[in-house]
Image (tube, rainbow, N blue to C red):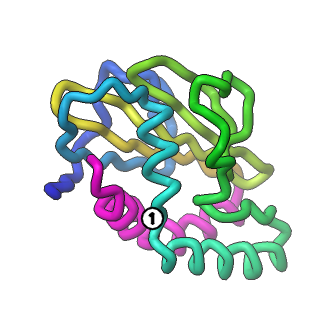
Amino acid sequence: MNITTTAIPPHTQIADKLRGADFHDCYETDLQPTPLTALELYLRVVATTPGWVNAAMALRNRIVQLAGLKNLGLLSDIDQNKPASAYKVGDRVGIFTIIYLSEQEVILGDADKHLNVNLSVCKLPGKVAISTVVHTKNALGRLYMLFVAPAHRRIVPATLRKASFL
């Protein structure tokens, strides 16, 4: 599987969130023609989250609670029996809430008093793009991202690699 880093596609909804971002990245990988929606792709990817990623999230949750950040749960904490078609904007999907939803792109996010995180899964011709945009709100959010950004750069490609159906 070929996973590349690239700019956030300018025609996507998440590109509108780039202004003033403190962190952003985008990974693309090939995608065979599929009837799956962007949300269905996301659900399938997080359902196969590598065990070490869930362990890292569990450790993160224990550590950050000491600093007043919330326990997000695990990336793979989704209802595997709930079909993608049952979700709508505002619904919680694991650690994120759906902010934008179309066949081609889903934006999921989470916000607290320290930062605002948005994640997009966008179907492109022959590819899927996974983009992340983070706006920090204070010093604790910036400090948090010093540790999370390097881990994030390993987590996204590893999670995509595990989703062998892509």
Q: Quadrant of the N terminus?
A: bottom left
Identify which residue, 121 or 36, lies in the foreground: 36
Q: Secondary structure at mark 1?
A: helix
Q: Residue furthest front?
A: 81
- Residue annotated with mark 1: 152
Q: Relative to 164, is 145 on the left or the right?
A: right
- Per the rendered image, the range of residues in magenta is 138-166
| Disc 1 residue type (three-letter) | His
- Indicate yes or no whether the magenta region holds residue 159: yes
Identify which residue, 128 or 81, lies in the foreground: 81
Q: Could you tell me which residue is drawn at 69 percent across and 38 percent down?
A: 97
Identify which residue, 132 or 88, lies in the foreground: 88
Residue 121 vertical placement versus 115 (above, below): above
Question: Residue 153 placed where, x, y %?
Answer: 37, 65
Total labels: the figure holds 1
Q: Could you tell me which residue is drawn at 28 percent across and 37 percent down?
A: 128
- Disc 1 residue crowd, few under 14, some 14–19, many 20+, Cα 10 Å: some
Quarter of the figure with residue 32? top left
Identify which residue, 135 or 139, lies in the foreground: 135
Question: Residue 82 placed where, x, y %?
Answer: 66, 38
Q: Could you tell me which residue is drawn at 57 percent across and 31 percent down?
A: 84
Q: Relative to 24, is 5 on the left or the right?
A: left
Magenta span: predominant SS is helix
Q: Relative to 162, is 58 on the left or the right?
A: right
Question: Residue 94 placed where, x, y %?
Answer: 67, 50
Residue 98 vertical placement versus 135 (above, below): above
Q: Could you tell me which residue is drawn at 67 percent across and 22 percent down?
A: 88
- Indicate yes or no whether the magenta region holds residue 74: no
Question: Residue 29 placed where, x, y %?
Answer: 22, 47
